[in-house]
Image (tube, rainbow, N blue to C red):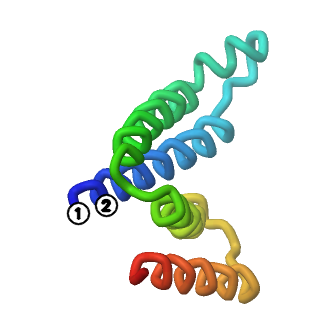
């Protein structure tokens, strides 16, 4: 049962990494080479580090959890990024996207109950 918490933590950290990528990508400085711009945008570097931690947790959890059970739970990351896109980046969310989110959540519930 503790492995489910490790999976959820891995997904959460991965989603935060993706949010950091988006934030960093929108705040890249206008001066310097592309590599200098990316390095100066510290959220991108933080996002890479978070992805690394997320991957290590994921590998740890896979030691004991069936992949067919664990992998669909990654979809929770879509849900978290969806919500962050709306609340943090003020992106427009249309009805088709909401419908897709509901389908994703339905699939996660079905997998979790199996």
Q: Quadrant of the rendered structure where residue 59 is? A: top left
Residue 84 visible in the picture? no
Q: Quadrant of the rendered structure where residue 40 is? A: top right
Q: Give the vertical position of 87 relative to 56 (above or below).
A: below
Question: Percent x, y for residue 85?
Answer: 59, 63
Q: Which residue is mark 1?
A: 1
- Mark 2 element type: helix
Question: Percent x, y for residue 91?
Answer: 66, 67
Residue in the picture at 48% in, 77% down: 111
Q: Is residue 106 left or right of residue 112?
A: right
The dot on residue 54 is none
Q: Which residue is mark 2?
A: 4
Question: Percent x, y for residue 36?
Answer: 68, 12
Q: Quadrant of the C terminus?
A: bottom left
Question: Percent x, y for residue 82?
Answer: 58, 67
Work out whether residue 73 or residue 51 is closer to the camera in this orientation and state it: 73
Marks 2/1 in contact by CB < 8 Å: the verdict is yes
Circle 2 crowding by C-alpha within 10 Å: few under 14, some 14–19, many from 20: some
Residue in the picture at 60% in, 39% down: 21
Disc 2/disc 1 C-alpha distance (Å): 6 Å
């Amino acid at each position: 049962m503790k492995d489910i918490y490790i999976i959820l933590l891995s997904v959460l950290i991965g989603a935060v990494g993706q949010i950091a990528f988006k934030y960093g990508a929108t705040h890249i400085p206008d001066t310097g080479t592309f590599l200098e711009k990316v390095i100066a945008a510290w959220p991108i570097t933080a996002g890479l580090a978070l992805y690394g931690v997320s991957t290590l947790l994921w590998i740890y959890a896979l030691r004991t959890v069936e992949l067919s059970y664990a992998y669909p739970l990654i979809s929770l990351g879509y849900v978290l990024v969806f919500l962050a896109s709306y609340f943090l980046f003020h992106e427009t969310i249309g009805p088709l996207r909401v419908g897709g989110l509901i389908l994703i959540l339905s699939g996660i519930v079905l997998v979790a109950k199996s």
